[in-house]
Amino acid sequence: AGAHAAAVEPQAASRAYGVVTEFKEKPDMSKFPVEDIRNFSIIAHVDHGKSTLADRLLELTGTIDKTKNNKQVLDKLQVERERGITVKAQTASLFYNFEGKRYLLNLIDTPGHVDFSYEVSRSLSACQGVLLVVDANEGIQAQTVANFFLAFEAQLSVIPVINKIDLKNADPKRVEKQIEKVFDIPGDECIKISAKLGTNVESVLQAVIERIPPPKVYRKNPLRALVFDSTFDQYRGVIANIALFDGVVSKGDKIVSAHTKKTYEVNEVGILNPNEQSTHKLYAGQVGFLIAGMKDVTEAQIGDTLHLHNHPVEPLPGFKSAKPMVFAGVYPVDQSEYNTLKSAIGKLTLNDSSVTVHRDSSLALGAGWRLGFLGLLHMEVFNQRLEQEYNASVILTTPTVPYKAVLSSAKLIKARRAVQKNMIFIDQNRVMLKYLFPLNEIVVDFYDSLKSLSSGYASFDYEDAGYQAAELVKMDILLNGNFVEELVTIVHKEKAYSVGKNICERLKDSLPRQLFEIAIQAVIGSKVIARETVKAYRKNVLAKCYGGDITRKMKLLKRQTEGKKKLRKIGNIEVPKDAFIKVLKTQSNK
């Protein structure tokens, strides 16, 4: 039997975390009727212990061996392990015996940071309930509230779990009252646990079975499956994560994408346990993966509905597309790497569908893309993944935000830089402030500043509030009176001087000196608001004069000045690429 298991599961031995090879053969998924299935997500604020709880649940159900090395088992990306945060929602199927019955629990571990909330909302589409994890020390924070309302709007059962009760300053009673006040969930429904030590975690699994309803699906209907996530494998093509709402899917089936209308043959179906485990079939109500020879990244659209060939169905509602909040230009370091980078961005956006991609070109940096992200951390993580997973080095230009311009001479109405909307005291130690901000005010380093000012205690969440009229001006940069198209910026009137001065100073530091003087000016309309000067190289024309008449010296200097003037008129200022990169690049210290 041991040799047989090794033949079927050769990958189990090579994994960093040993998977319990309970299944000597492919598991029979028909043994799990709909009423014995529970699909749930773990949602919480950053660092409240979601991934740790997921580790304990995997151990309890025998999905992974119980060892001391089980830390962030579901966080498979290098960037997740380095930063200690979850970036991608990950699925795992757990088998659990309770009161003489064998249950199939599909768990989705989700990210907690506001920049990855799109991952959370997508994951919830495959669930009927959630575990809302709250830190017994920190209490309710911004993303706890935001994620709760995502689950509440999706009409999912919510099980509050108070984690980290083993900490010295833990106050589960206070947090219980907060949950009761903010979410209107009775305090006695809260489960108090320590995911790190494993205290009371078993009762979480029992609550999942007792409080979360089984999925409402119909196995006798034709196949209807929702693609809620996908990844690209260079050997097998697109691997789609699917939730089955109706019917059955098995290897060899001919399926059609409702979005592209293309037909495929299913090569493999299975469950994530947490690594891929092939099965003969997947049935309605179950969550798993499907490989069907989709070779192009554009073919597996997240939110797509898959159905059997010759059995068209009403497509599932899919997902609202994510609204990008931060934009950045992405350019290859060398234009010869353009196609390689294009392929890398395509594969990565398949795995992270919240990134919007538009072709762009810059006179300074060549052909590239304007990418839209959900936040600054999202942008950093995307860049890090490009480097780590695809070995692609890129130039990232300063993030910009979208503006709507009304082309008329009418003056735009004045806009305040932040308007307080309301202020709610959650308890004696915690206050929730609601502000209306221009996106430009929070997009660069607002979150970092907030964290440092409040010693890490304040938390922050935002959503799009639409466009508002504001006093915005177009600022041009001139070099010796010539416009530099690549450096045109839109700024608020009040901030124009400081932004203009900053760009001029950065240009002065990065432009090479010429034989003539270079005047760097920031202008709004015809008004110069900031100026810096790059001094010219100057030959000492008086070196050959040993004493002599002063008029001789004056004549030589005058001729030099006239020559410089003429040169300044006809001399082209070649702005090197490095100078643009220094000016446009995001500055870590700004």
Image (tube, rainbow, N blue to C red):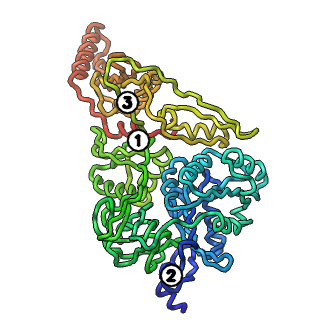
Give x and y (percent) for residue 378: 48, 49
Looking at the image, which residue is at 45% across and 40% down? 586
Residue ID for mark 1: 327
**Which element carries disc 3, helix, strand or loop?**
strand
Give x and y (percent) for residue 395: 38, 46
Residue ID for mark 2: 27
Q: Is residue 288 above or below residue 460?
A: below
Q: Which of the marked residues, 2 or 1, is nearer the chain's N terminus? A: 2
Asked whether residue 124 appears in the rendered view, the answer is yes
Amino acid carrying label 3: it is Thr
Q: Which of the marked residues, 1 or 3, is nearer the chain's N terminus? A: 1
Looking at the image, which residue is at 40% across and 42% down? 328
Answer few, some or many: residues within 10 Å of disc 2's Cα (few below 14, many 20 plus, some between 14 and 19). Answer: some
**Which element carries disc 2, helix, strand or loop?**
loop
Amino acid carrying label 1: it is Phe
Q: Quick one: 212 or 465, which is closer to the camera?
A: 212
Looking at the rendering, which quadrant does residue 578 occupy? Answer: top left
- Cα separation, mark 2 vs mark 1, equals 46 Å
Instruction: Give the left or right position of residue 94, taking residue 307 as reference.
Output: right
- Cα separation, mark 1 vs mark 3, equals 14 Å
Q: Is residue 380 above or below residue 513?
A: below
Instruction: Give the left or right position of residue 421, taking residue 279 as reference.
Output: right
The circle on residue 489 is 3
Q: Quick one: 577 or 586, which is closer to the camera?
A: 586
- Report if the CB atoms under discs 1 and 3 are less than 8 Å apart: no
Front disc: 3 or 2: 2
Looking at the image, which residue is at 51% across and 87% down? 5
